[in-house]
Image (cartoon, rainbow, N blue to C red):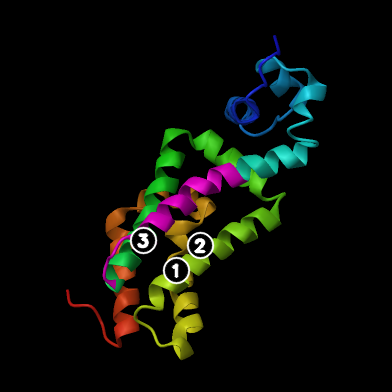
Amino acid sequence: MARPKPDTEKIRHKLLQAAEDMLAETGGRRLVLSEIARRVGLSQSHAHNFFATKSDLVRALAERWFAEVEGALDAVQKDQLDPAEALEAYVLTILRLKRARHDADPRLFAAYIDLAGDHGDVIAAHAGRLRDGLREILSRQVPSSHLETATDMVMDATVAFRIPHMIALMRPGASDERARRVVAMCQAALNGGLPRE
């Protein structure tokens, strides 16, 4: 009888989870592929079939971390919200997911921030996808001739609610209420006026 093929996706998931556990335990100071492999019952050489280098492992961790945020934003874009509601949902979705991660394990959150510093291309790709999503939302209410300026304005205004380092730094101020006020000011600027009190 033939041996069953291993479930490579399941093994990959186990390796990533063990790596994340190690990050949490060490505050991001230690990430050793041989130890991660041992934790899931694999040889180091077998683990290298999934992640050739530590850099590949870190990249996969970062991409997994961003995937949930990007998936949630895709859902916001697919909802048939009016433009103002979509803009608020966009900002609050990012804030709530990242704030929940921070609050669940501040050390792991900080470890991910540190890891991200070594993989600027992964961060840039994620930021680009977030920007594309925002641009799509704004395109429903802003003329194409002003779309890039409007996108820059909202990106700049919402830094404290999107960037993990800022959420950690300003945690008490990373509230839904504060984010809503900033979004209302952005919406007012997009509409050419000021929000009513």
Q: Earlier in the sequence, mark 3 or mark 1?
A: 3
- Whether tag 1 and tag 2 are in contact, CB under 8 A, the answer is yes
Taking the image as shown, residue 114 lies to the left or right of residue 54, namely left
Kindly report the distance in space between the C-alpha atoms of the residues bearing marks 3 and 1: 13 Å
Q: Which residue is mark 2?
A: 130
Q: Nearer the viewer, mark 3 or mark 1?
A: 3
- Quadrant of image for the N terminus: top right
Q: Which residue is located at x 47 percent, y 76 percent?
A: 151
Kindly report which numbered mark, 2 or 3, lies closer to the viewer in this rendering. 3
Q: Is residue 66 magenta?
A: yes
Would you place residue 59 above or below residue 155 in this image? above
**Disc 3, disc 1: CB below 8 Å?**
no
Provide the residue span drawn in magenta.
Answer: 63-82
The three-letter code of the residue at mark 1 reads: Leu
* Residue density around tag 3, few if under 14, some if 14–19, many if 20 or more, within 10 Å: few
Q: Is residue 64 magenta?
A: yes
In the rendered image, residue 183, in percent from the top left (x then y), is placed at 33, 68
Residue 12, quarter of picture: top right
Q: Position of residue 132 (x, y in %)?
A: 51, 68
